[in-house]
Image (tube, rainbow, N blue to C red):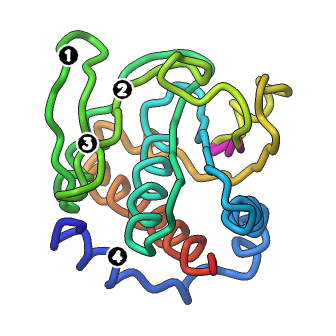
Amino acid sequence: MLFDQIINTIEDLNSNTVTEDRKTVLNDLIEYIQDKKNLDEVCHINFICTHNSRRSHLAQIWAQTCAAFYNIPKLFCFSGGTEATKLYQTIKDTLEEQGFIFKIEKKGWNPRFHIYFSKSEKPINGFSKVYDHKVNQVTNFAVVMTCSDADENCPIIPGAEKRISVMYEDPKFFDNSVLEKEKYKERSLQIATEMKYVFSKIK
């Protein structure tokens, strides 16, 4: 059972706002998940951006949460970057405001969190890491590129059986501005809406 606030957030998202252009972009991800489900296979998805600090975390967390919301079994989401930095504080703040619970597991410059979205589901590992870090799936997974820089600089991801490009604008351009909180919330809800759309299509 998902936390009540997260259920309310997802229910309030309007999938009809996903444009036809974005639906075309997301269709490869829908097909990959559906094919795995049809074959009764485990589905692994690794969301990648350059620093694994913002967009890839949002995509990983909302995808895993929406999969649980729609009762899609045997699906596991990961995230990574072309380099490790740290999970950006405003991403944490934004997701906490939307109902997620962060519990720190390891302190440091790049802290590790367990991110809870449910009373029964396992928490998500939240910290910045390279895409082939040992906590991530290394074979038989789909890689979903969430930024153009990582897409251009990673022409080959070893072990991936499918590569999908689903680009999002980087909210970091609004860091330290009066619009920072608003734009991070906007990006989180955009990604949440698109992940809701994706998983609502899985039969």
Q: Secondary structure at mark 4?
A: helix
* Percent of width and height locating residue 83: 56, 16
Q: CA distance from mark 4 to mark 1?
A: 30 Å
| Viewer-closest of 117 and 37 | 37
Q: Are marks 4 and 1 in contact (CB under 8 Å)?
A: no
Report, in whole angstroms, how far the alpha carbon at label 3 lies from the one at label 4. 17 Å
Reading the chain from its start, which is encountered first: label 3 or label 4? 4
Which of pointers 3 and 2 lies earlier in the amino acid sequence?
3
Residue depicted at 54% across the width and 27% down the height: 136
Q: Amino acid at mark 2?
A: Phe
Q: Name the residue that disc number 4 marks.
A: 10
Residue type, mark 1 in image:
Lys
Q: Position of residue 68 (x, y in %)?
A: 40, 65
Q: Give me the C-alpha separation between circle 2 and circle 4.
A: 24 Å
On screen, residue 139 versus residue 51, left or right, reads right
Q: Residue furthest right?
A: 155
Reading the image, the residue beneath label 2 is 127
